[in-house]
Image (tube, rainbow, N blue to C red):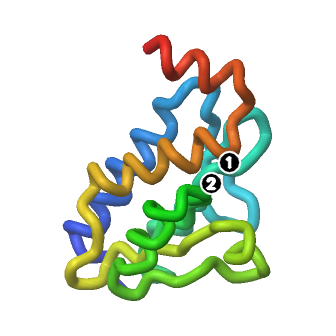
Amino acid sequence: MAVPKNALKKWQKVREFALGLPGATEEFPWGETVAKADKKVFVFLGVADGSHPLAVTLKLTDEEAHAHALTSPGAEPAGYGLGRAGWVRIPLEESGSPRADLLCDWVEESYRVVAPKRLIAELDQA
């Protein structure tokens, strides 16, 4: 199954942004891409090989951002009980899915929720 070009471009921008945050690392547990801050996942990026629809999963504890994210086409609380903790899965291949800059804003918010204070301080100084 081919990945739509615009969805892949969005995914690449989000991945690049996430990995550019202070102390961010990329790992591949369960065969999917995740970005971590100090060993804690702040964004699940899934797989980009076309075997599954492209999506990002983020932790949004700000009520407004969380509600906004859930209005994205196909968005839903994350599985495995993560949805109860504020995690939202946002598909990238749906028509009308959020633009990359908004997704990056949400990635930064997720990072701020998960990352240790010293890394957030580093981000604020940049």
Q: Work out whether residue 59 can be spotted.
A: yes
Residue ID for mark 1:
27
Q: Residue at x 49, y 19 (%)?
A: 124
Seen from the viewer's position, the closer of residues 63 and 37 is 63
Amino acid type assigned to the residue bearing label 1 in the image:
Glu
Q: Is residue 85 above or below residue 104?
A: below
Disc 2: CA contacts within 10 A as few (<14), some (14-19) or many (>=20): many
Q: Position of residue 117 (x, y in %)?
A: 71, 25
Amino acid type assigned to the residue bearing label 2 in the image:
Val
Q: Earlier in the sequence, mark 1 or mark 2?
A: 1
Q: Is residue 54 above or below residue 73?
A: above
Q: Is 65 positioned to the left or the right of 10 in the image?
A: right
Q: Are marks 1 and 2 in contact (CB under 8 Å)?
A: yes
Q: Work out whether residue 33 can be spotted.
A: no
Q: CA distance from mark 1 to mark 2?
A: 5 Å
Q: Residue at x 59, y 42 (%)?
A: 111
Residue ID for mark 2:
34
Seen from the viewer's position, the closer of residues 27 and 77 is 77
